[in-house]
Amino acid sequence: MTVTIAVAGKGGTGKTTLSALLIRYAVQNRLGKVLAIDADPSSNLHLVLGTSLTKTVGDIREDAREQVPSGMSRQEWLDYEIRTAIEEGDAFDLLAMGRPEGQGCYCAANHMLRTIIDRICKAYDVVVMDNEAGMEHLSRRTTRDVDHLILVSDASLRGLAAAEAMYALSKELEINVRQTYLVINRVTGDLPDAWRERIERLNVPLLAQIPYDPQLVEFDGNGRPLVELPNDALVSRAVEQVARTLLNK
Ligand SMILES: Nc1ncnc2c1ncn2[C@@H]1O[C@H](COP(=O)(O)OP(=O)(O)OP(=O)(O)O)[C@@H](O)[C@H]1O
Ligand SMILES: [Mg+2]
């Protein structure tokens, strides 16, 4: 059975960092076949994972408007193209969604793409999806049918308010999420009392508080892939706890 984790939250709260370190945990602990999905149109998950990226689902959707070869149905062609867009690595595979649809009707292509991607995901044991900031992906339903939805906030009340709004929208849209969690990132001290009350009211389990980690800042500053962070770095240890809860049956 595939375990699917989606990571969402306000801009710059640490979604990509958390996604990358969850992927690393799954690989290091040999939890099976791992697929990283970059669902952020600015496609940067591959950089922190230290892999390359040549083609996105968005590129394929654009191409499908013009160049489906004769003798092939559009569905067959999309299926083939998506498979070539998967960056296959020794440790994990990566699929980037790229930009969302432009002008014009993409409904049929989107429906086919979703079916294909759902089928591809089933071939993996662990799927981790790094989302763009904000709530668009919820409305577009690129985040759906997930086991674990992690709402990441930084230690600002604006971050928490964004997480609250996303949770409310996910309920309203009846997105099929088994369990939603809250993770607070870049924590430097105790959370103010006001936080405790808000989190209790939100009624979403607080899965972890990830400390501010200067070593991570140094890695990012030098463009070093985060998957090379030592296992005993502050963030690595905190994410390990998150991963243990979600991935170890
Ligand atoms: N625990 C932490 N300690 C220190 N810096 C952190 C921590 N977590 C994330 N950062 C830094 O915060 C910045 C934003 O992190 P990241 O790119 O993971 O956020 P994001 O939510 O994916 O952003 P975006 O919304 O732009 O996609 C990065 O420079 C990263 O190094
Ligand atoms: Mg990101």
Image (cartoon, rainbow, N blue to C red):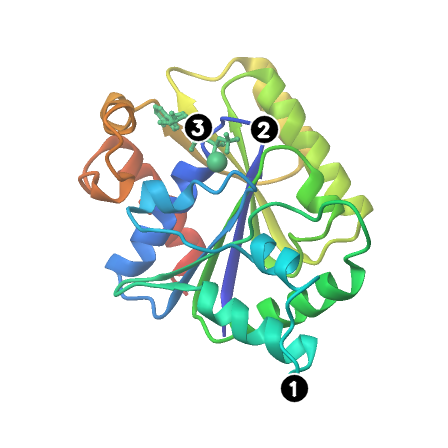
Give the residue at x 28% y 46%: 50
* In the displayed structure image, the side of residue 77 where residue 27 appears, left or right: left
Asked if ligand 1 lies within 8 A of label 2, the reply is: yes
Where residue 133 appears, x then y in whole percent?
59, 33
Q: Secondary structure at mark 3?
A: strand
Amino acid at pointer 3:
Asn
Q: Dot 3, how many residues are within 10 Å of its Cα: few (below 14), some (14-19), or many (20+)? A: many
- Residue 198 visible: yes
The residue that label 2 is drawn on is 10
Query: In the rendered structure, which disc, 2 or 1, sits on the residue that comes first in sequence?
Result: 2
Residue 185: image tag:
3
Amino acid at pointer 1:
Gly
Residue 71: image tag:
1
Query: In the rendered structure, which disc, 1 or 3, sits on the residue that comes first in sequence?
Result: 1
Given this view, does label 1 or label 3 mark the residue nearer the observer?
A: 1
Q: Dot 2, how many residues are within 10 Å of its Cα: few (below 14), some (14-19), or many (20+)? A: many
